[in-house]
Image (cartoon, rainbow, N blue to C red):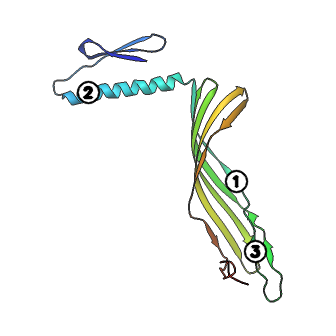
């Protein structure tokens, strides 16, 4: 895209197809030179943004959501009064996840940044009570892709995870669980 300043504050814009667009500023006597300059800059930024999005063959803004189930490790109950130690397995609980994404396509290539919130939880049925494990995280994946042929694509990219508070309620902490002797 080529931008040129013309006579009488006319802006001449040529895109890649050599299509000509002309704009003329009408100034009011009460406008300061800084206000006029700001208008010109805002117009240029607007056209560059529109040009970027129009050069992208396809862009999609969307939301996503769903339910997940996961399983973390077992809880070990140490031997007590001659009873053997027990590994308690977690029960999977259903928890939500939701987020938003922007997919911008450039021919066969695309980039898709996302922002997701994920809640994770399990519970353990212990002999005297139930213990609950909870955490949540914010995920920011940045997916780069290449469409080999429709519908087959290759994806690559980092996924940044920011965990919130993690809790395990209903479990008594003992010297053994802190690494002490039995």
Left or right of 18 on screen, residue 164:
right
- C-alpha span from label 1 to label 3: 25 Å
In the picture of the structure, the residue carrying the numbered disc 3 is 76
In the rendered structure, the answer to whether residue 79 lies left or right of residue 112 reads: right
Residue 3 horizontal/vertical position (percent): 37, 17
Query: Label 2, on which residue?
Result: 37
Say which residue label 1 marks: 68
Give the structural element (helix, strand or loop) at label 1: strand
In the rendered image, which quarter is residue 158 located in?
top right
How far apart marks 2 and 3 lie (CA) works out to 69 Å
Does dot 3 land on a helix, a strand or a loop?
Answer: strand
Mark in front: 2 vs 1: 2
Of the residues under marks 1 and 3, which one precedes in the sequence? 1
Mark 2–mark 3 CB contact (< 8 Å): no
Residue at x 23% of width, y 30% of height: 35
Q: What is the quadrant of residue 61 in the picture?
A: top right
């Amino acid at each position: 895209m080529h931008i040129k300043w013309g006579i009488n504050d006319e802006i001449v814009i040529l895109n890649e197809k050599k299509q000509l667009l002309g704009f003329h500023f009408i100034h009011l006597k009460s406008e300061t030179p800084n206000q006029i300059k700001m208008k010109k800059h805002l117009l240029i930024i607007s056209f560059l943004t529109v040009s970027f999005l129009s050069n992208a063959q396809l862009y999609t803004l969307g939301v996503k959501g769903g339910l997940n189930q996961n399983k973390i490790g077992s809880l070990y109950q140490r031997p007590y009064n001659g009873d053997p130690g027990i590994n308690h397995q977690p029960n999977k609980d259903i928890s939500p996840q939701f987020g938003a994404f922007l997919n911008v396509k450039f021919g066969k290539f695309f980039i898709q940044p996302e922002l997701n919130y994920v809640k994770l939880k399990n519970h353990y049925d212990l002999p005297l009570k139930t213990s609950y494990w909870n955490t949540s995280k914010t995920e920011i994946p940045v997916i780069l892709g290449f469409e080999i042929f429709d519908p087959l694509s290759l994806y690559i990219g980092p996924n940044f995870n920011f965990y919130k508070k993690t809790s395990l309620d209903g479990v008594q902490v003992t010297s053994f669980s802190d690494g002490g002797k039995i």
